[in-house]
Each structure stands twice: as C-alpha cells, then as structure tokens.
Image (tube, rainbow, N blue to C red):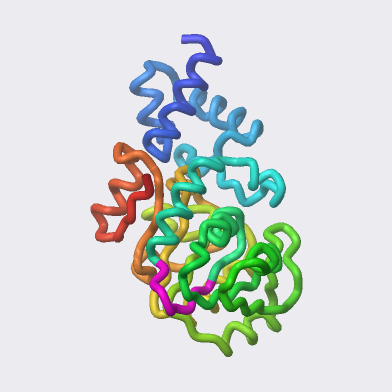
C-alpha cells in the first residue's frame, strides 16, 4: 500500500472510530509501528489529527479563528441548533454560550416564544436585537478567539443569574476526557454558567464527537445530555450512550 493510500485509510478510520491505535493498525496493515507512527506524525503536522500516546484522535477545532469556525460544518451546526431550540420551553430563562452553534440557536429562536436569554457573547446579544426575547449580557474581559466575556468579572456576573437551561458549546467530547475546550479561562466560565442553570445540554456537532482539547470543562455525568448529529454508526457516540450519557439525536 502506498503511503498516500495508507494515510487516507487512517483518516477514514479516524472519522468513523474517533481514535487510532498504532499497534493495532500496524498489525492489520502488515507494516511496522514506526511506519504508522510516522504517518500519524505527518498527519498531525498537517493539522489533520492530534497525536496521543499510542495513536491519534481527531484534531479539535479550538485553534481555528471565529470567522473560520463560522464556515465549518454549517449544515451540521444548523441541525444541532434546531434540536436545541426544541429544548427551550416557553417562559423559561436560557443561558446561551458563545460560539457558532449557539449563534445559530439564536437565529432560529421562534419570535412567538416567550423566553429570556442570558449570554456572555456580544455577538449573540446583537443577533437578538430585533427579537422579542428579553436579553441580558454578561460583561468581562473579551476573549477575542471566541468573542465572549471571560475572566473574574465575567464569572462574578455569572454568579448573579439563574436559568432553567444552559446550552453549552465545547470543542471536544470523548468518554475518556469528558467535555473539553481550548482555553483555561473559557473552560472556567462554562463551569460557572453551568452552575447557574437547572440543566446543561451540550451542543456537539459531528466534528466535536471524538475530539479532545487541552482544558477540561465538565465530566459527562455533570450534564443533562449531549445534542449531536453524528451518524448512528459513530463508535464514540455509541460508547457515550453505552456509558449512560443521554444523547439527543439531531437530524
């Protein structure tokens, strides 16, 4: 098998299984572990996967710019956002996280639903200017990568609110690492907001399932469930459900 064919196979397996184990692949492909590790190193250098001990996992999108993330998996995010809108009950108070999937939720909010929205994202607040919803924006230091307020001031502001539902975005969802994101302050802010809501549901479009970022947000047993449009055959999603994680399938 040519190197290019082998790498394409590795990427296909990564998309389906959510992880690669170098030893197992070397045995299956009748090649050396060094060859597989070299392939994985080259794929990681190209930004196509993230190397971990013994193999690789999908590359999280945390490093991409906000503008770039708005262009990625738009159909997937729309499906997830539409399912999340179904979780919002009339008369409720909802905390909307920052990020591109949350922005799609704001855009899809029906105008005839009585709802109060709390957000630390100026982008989301502005998107609701012409919506009848009551909107409260939490302030703090602007984390420009995700265009959200963060830091001590934002955490203090979060402590003053209470909500029925928190729709939280992350960049990685895995059974072993839990819910993760790419910035330590952003992770802390997500935890602070989750503590202020009766239920937290995680918005996880397909590319987030199986990915992992450096900073943990919450354990899987600390949220009500995950909203995802990953295929039913996705091995990581199946493992999550097998572990008792509630999954709302977005279609």
User: Which residue is found at the position 44% from the left and 46% from the top?
Assistant: 210
Above or below — where is 125 with respect to 163?
Answer: above
Residue 99, position in %: x, y? 61, 58
Q: Magenta part of the protein: which range? A: 88-95
Is residue 36 or residue 105 the one in the foreground?
A: 105
Is residue 43 or residue 75 the one in the foreground?
A: 75
Residue 202, position in %: x, y? 44, 61
Can residue 214 be seen here? The reply is no
Above or below — where is 159 with respect to 125?
Answer: below
User: Which residue is found at the position 24% from the left and 53% from the top?
Assistant: 242
Q: Main secondary structure of the magenta part?
A: loop
Query: Is 141 a magenta residue?
Result: no
Residue 91, position in %: x, y? 43, 79
User: Which residue is found at the position 56% from the left and 26% from the top?
Assistant: 38
Relative horizontal placement of residue 141, taking residue 250 as reference (left or right): right
Relative horizontal placement of residue 125, taking residue 36 as reference (left or right): right
Is residue 126 or residue 200 the one in the foreground?
A: 126
Relative horizontal placement of residue 50, taking residue 63 as reference (left or right): left
Q: Quadrant of the C terminus?
A: top left
User: Which residue is found at the position 27% from the left and 53% from the top?
Assistant: 241
Can residue 142 be seen here? The reply is yes
Residue at the extreme bottom: 160
The image quarter containing residue 181 is bottom right
Count of all numbered marks drawn on residues in the image: 0
The image quarter containing residue 103 is bottom right
Residue at the extreme top: 1
Residue 88, position in %: x, y? 42, 68
Above or below — where is 148 with respect to 54?
Answer: below
Is residue 185 or residue 133 the one in the foreground?
A: 133
């Amino acid at each position: 098998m040519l190197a290019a064919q082998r790498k394409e196979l590795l990427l296909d397996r990564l998309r389906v299984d959510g992880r690669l184990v170098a030893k197992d692949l070397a045995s299956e492909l009748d090649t050396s572990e060094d060859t597989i590790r070299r392939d994985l190193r080259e794929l990681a250098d190209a930004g196509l996967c993230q190397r971990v001990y013994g193999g690789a996992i999908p590359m999280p999108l945390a490093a991409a710019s906000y503008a770039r993330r708005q262009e990625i998996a738009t159909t997937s995010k729309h499906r997830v956002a539409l399912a999340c809108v179904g979780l919002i009950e009339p008369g409720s108070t909802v905390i909307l996280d920052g990020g591109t999937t949350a922005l799609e939720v704001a855009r899809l909010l029906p105008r005839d639903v009585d709802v109060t929205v709390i957000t630390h994202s100026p982008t989301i607040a502005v998107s609701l200017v012409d919506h009848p919803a009551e909107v409260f924006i939490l302030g703090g230091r602007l984390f420009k990568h995700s265009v959200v307020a963060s830091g001590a001031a934002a955490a203090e502001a979060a402590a003053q609110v209470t909500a029925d539902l928190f729709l939280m975005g992350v960049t990685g969802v895995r059974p072993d690492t839990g819910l993760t994101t790419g910035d330590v302050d952003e992770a802390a802010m997500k935890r602070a907001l989750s503590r202020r809501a009766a239920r937290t549901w995680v918005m996880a479009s397909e590319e987030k399932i199986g990915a992992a970022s450096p900073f943990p947000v919450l354990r899987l047993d600390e949220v009500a469930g995950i909203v995802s449009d990953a295929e039913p055959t996705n091995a990581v999603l199946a493992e999550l459900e097998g572990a008792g994680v509630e999954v709302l399938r977005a279609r």
